[in-house]
Amino acid sequence: MKCNLKNVLLVILSSFLLSACSFSFIYNNLDWWSNWYLDDFVTLNKDQQQVFDSTFDELHAWHRQTQLREYYLQLTVLKNQVNAGISEDELNIHLSAVKNHWFVVREKAKPKLISLTHTLSKDQRKQVIDEIENINKERIEDRDELTKAQWYKEECKETQQQFKKWIGRLTKEQVDEVCNFIQGSSSTFTQRMDYRIKWHSDFKQVLAMNTNKQQYEVMFTELISNPESLKSDEYVMISAKNSEISIKIFQYFMNNLTDKQRKRFNKKIDKLIDDLKALELDG
């Protein structure tokens, strides 16, 4: 199982996970994707499904009208900085901004999510709890048992693949450099799973309590808005170190692009910016 290094890299520019075309397709069909994902956890009754659908449509419209502009403006700044020579400080600002994008969406969705979960029956709550537990168990059971050398090799390969999607074929020097950087990173799988299990335990306790809606909202709000409090000091420390390394890797690549790589990067960023603008207008 890989560490979160590539995720930290990609959170700087979360759109690196998708091509512009697939991003537009998925964004315009988020209602279907969300229902497909939700079905893995719980089966809603007719009234609950209607509430979920209307709430999701409202959230999706809000996101299209208010958030997409924030994304393409940030991408425009990132592109200009990359072409001028981007600094670690600038990348850290982008990383903080992308995290904040997620926090804004989470806080917007939180009240409706809490309200919906409060309507779940005892059987539905058990269904949710059991599914999360099964996912955690499967992740632990499916974990690849790799030596440290094998883990570094796999992580190096994964990171290269992510950059290839946006800048094309890498030079030997770039390959060597990214692998050297990754030597300083560490897997967070064990710590991350400990955190997930702790969160699931607290989530289970909240769902099991027969409290009024106001009390339930207070308890659930803390669980959603402050999950980081459940992370161990070791997890926080390793994640911070990995984040520093991911910033250095990203800066190295962006400041050492060949002419061909820079042309490809700019072309793909421009395409994504145009698609985000088009998605905004579609609303």
Image (cartoon, helix red, strand yellow):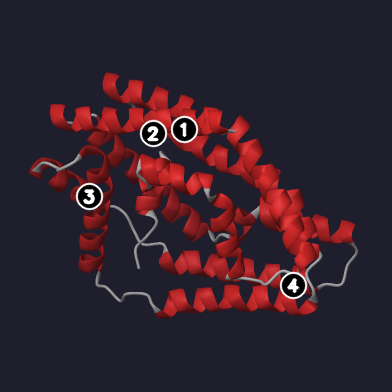
- Relative image position of residue 1 (x, y in whole percent): 35, 68
Q: Mark 4 points at which residue?
A: 205
Query: What is the CA distance from the residue labelled 1 to the residue labelled 4?
Result: 40 Å
Q: Name the residue under label 2.
A: 272
Q: Quadrant of residue 52?
A: bottom right
Q: Is residue 175 above or below residue 101?
A: below
Report the front residue among 170 and 63: 63
Q: Quadrant of residue 252?
A: top left
Query: What is the CA distance from the residue labelled 2 to the residue labelled 1?
Result: 6 Å
Helix, strand or loop at mark 3: helix
Query: What is the CA distance from the residue labelled 1 to the residue labelled 3?
Result: 26 Å
Q: Is residue 260 above or below residue 205?
A: above
Earlier in the chain: of badge 2 and badge 3, it is 3
Q: Would you call the spot at circle 4 few (<14 residues within 10 Å), some (14-19), or many (20 or more)?
A: few
Type of amino acid at the residue the image marks with label 3: Gln
- Relative image position of residue 256 (x, y in whole percent): 19, 31
Q: Are marks 2 and 3 in contact (CB under 8 Å)?
A: no
Query: What is the CA distance from the residue labelled 2 to the residue labelled 3?
Result: 21 Å
